[in-house]
Amino acid sequence: MDDLSRFCCHNFNCPDCGQRGLENLTVCGHFGKDNRIRLLYCRTCKARFSERKGTPLFNTKLSDEKSLSLLDHLREGCGVRQTRRLVGVHRDTVTRLARLAGDHAKTLHDERVAFSPSHR
């Protein structure tokens, strides 16, 4: 049995949209190279979406290991050229994934800060 508690429906018209742990999601298939990416199905609204939807890895062709290695090198302060050489990808791939990860981090930060307690 797959643990899907960290995922949520991404359909904005679904009453369960954005809510994790409701057990409304099931795995209805796999896709990608070697069928490694799960296709999730929401029982509430009948929508299907990738488990990577809403993440910087959505629509990337890189393996999980290569993507995480790329982001780790950037996090450690490596530049685009150095990261490109270490991971073995094109420099545009490094730039694109860095931009997507940065946008994702900003959105997550803004969401979390909005719900933090106010200081008086």
Image: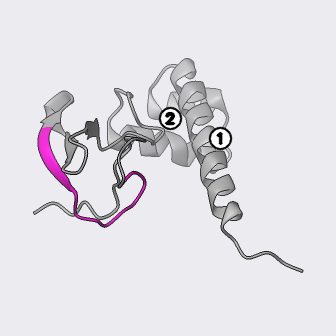
| Label 2 crowd bin: few (<14), some (14–19), many (20+), radius 10 Å | few
Q: Is residue 1 left or right of residue 106?
A: left
- CB atoms of marks 2 and 1 within 8 Å: yes
Q: Residue at x 39, y 51 (%)?
A: 17
- x and y, in percent, of residue 48 in the image: 23, 37
The image quadrant where one finds the C terminus is: bottom right
> From what the image shows, is residue 31 above or below residue 93?
below
Front-most of 115 and 81? 115
Q: Residue at x 20, y 41 (%)?
A: 46
- x and y, in percent, of residue 6 in the image: 35, 61
User: Which residue was labeled with disc 2?
Assistant: 86
Q: Which residues are magenta?
A: 17-29
Q: Residue at x 65, y 41 (%)?
A: 78
| Label 1 crowd bin: few (<14), some (14–19), many (20+), radius 10 Å | some
- x and y, in percent, of residue 108 in the image: 60, 53
Front-most of 16 and 37? 16
SS assignment at label 2: helix
> From what the image shows, is residue 5 above or below residue 80?
below
Q: Residue at x 57, y 21 (%)?
A: 91
Amino acid marked by disc 1: Cys
Q: Is residue 24 magenta?
A: yes
The image quadrant where one finds the N terminus is: bottom left
Q: Is residue 41 left or right of residue 81?
A: left
Amino acid marked by disc 2: Leu
User: Which residue was labeled with disc 1?
Assistant: 78
